[in-house]
Image (tube, rainbow, N blue to C red):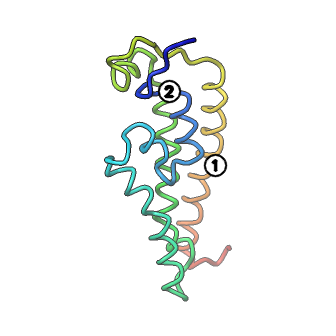
Amino acid sequence: MTNRSPSFKNKTIAALLASIGGCLGLYRFYLGGRRDIWAWLHFACLPLSLLLYFSQATAQPFFAFAPLILSTLGGFLACLIIGTMSDEKWDALFNPDEARKSDTNWPMALILVFTLGIGAGSLIAVIARSFDLLLTGGMYG
């Protein structure tokens, strides 16, 4: 039976959490715990966006959900940064006192391809919708 340390931070799990739950800061909670202020700021984007949406009946939903959209895009970016970091650098940052070493394989490549596709498409959509709303007043959608 292998000795699994609860403090060992798996790079693949962190990248998956950043890709799927980056808008809620799940990867930040995984890496830094409950004391990470950035994790709580990510997490606060959902209630803040809902509050803005329900308090402003005439506001565009796009602008009401802007905090959540930015948090989501930040999660995609974090996934790409985590995934492209070398295993040695990852272990030096997050597993300095661990005997186990990170060894990422093909699942990381799949996570990165998925995140790059969804993240790039989302960023293009956000830019297009922003220009539509700001320059035409939402005439095209």
Instruction: Determine crowd level at label 1: few under 14, some 14-19, many 20+ residues with C-alpha closer than 10 A.
Output: few
- The structure residue drawn at horizontal position 37% and vertical position 26%, both measured from the top left corner, is 94
Indicate the position of residue 138 as horizontal and vertical percent values: 60, 77
Lateral position of residue 91 relative to residue 53, left or right: left
Q: Nearer the viewer, residue 59 or 132?
A: 59
Q: Split into 4 quadrants, where in the image is the C terminus?
A: bottom right
Indicate the position of residue 64 as horizontal and vertical percent values: 50, 74
Q: Quadrant of residue 13?
A: top right
Could you tell me which secondary element the residue under label 1 belongs to? helix
Q: Which residue is mark 1?
A: 121
Q: Tell me the kind of residue under disc 1.
A: Gly
Lateral position of residue 92 relative to residue 21, left or right: left
Q: Nearer the viewer, mark 2 or mark 1?
A: 2
The mark that comes first in sequence, 2 or 1, is 2
Indicate the position of residue 62 as horizontal and vertical percent values: 55, 71
Q: Which residue is mark 2?
A: 11
- The structure residue drawn at horizontal position 54% and vertical position 88%, both measured from the top left corner, is 58
